[in-house]
Amino acid sequence: MIAIWAAELYLDKINRLSLKEHGREGTLKVAGEGAQLNKPTNGEYARTVAAFRDFLSDLKDVLDEATTVNLLASYGRTEELVHFASLKEHHETVIQHYIQRAEAKKALAVLRKPSVSPELQYKFGPSLISLDPYETVEAWISAGSNLNPRRLIPALMRYASTPQPP
């Protein structure tokens, strides 16, 4: 419970720094002759996010998974949500995120990990081959005997039937 509370404190601080950085919030601070907006440096925001990611890495086994996911989602921290899913080895969530962002190379990097089930290759094959056919086929070739070529045929057929740009 304390770890979740600490996570929420981190998220609140990140949110406040983000708002200040984008000029939506800030206090006037009298400095000498004039006043200036009290904004964080970009480094402060980056350091806080990095510290929060380290916090997630260190306490991944202590944090309640459902509560942490809901908390990250409620603060709109998609990148940290993907980071946490990666730490918890929820490869499917991570791959879906990258495919939704059309980042095929990152999705393929996850699929190349030895701990990832070959079933995910078959599941995401059609999406990946349409995003980056060359890299996807290269990944399949490098997987070698771990994949059943017959199960990849539907992805290839779907790709072959879609119109290709000139």
Image (tube, rainbow, N blue to C red):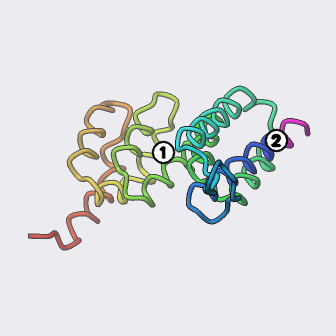
Which residue is tagged 1?
A: 119
Q: Quadrant of residue 1?
A: top right
Please say if 120 is above or below 35. above
Q: Which of pointers 1 and 2 indicates the residue nearer the eye? A: 2
Picture coordinates of residue 32 (x, y %)?
Answer: 64, 48
Q: CA distance from mark 1 to mark 2?
A: 27 Å
Labelled pair 1, 2 in contact (Cβ < 8 Å) = no
Picture coordinates of residue 148 (x, y %)?
Answer: 35, 41
- Which element carries disc 1, helix, strand or loop? helix
Q: Amino acid at mark 2?
A: Asp
Please give the name of the residue rendered at 61% of the width and 40% of the height, measured from the top-left corner.
49
Q: Is residue 3 magenta?
A: yes
Give left or right: position of 26 versus 63: left
Looking at the rendering, in which quadrant would you find the C terminus? Answer: bottom left
**Magenta region, residue range:** 1-5
Picture coordinates of residue 155 (x, y %)?
Answer: 32, 58
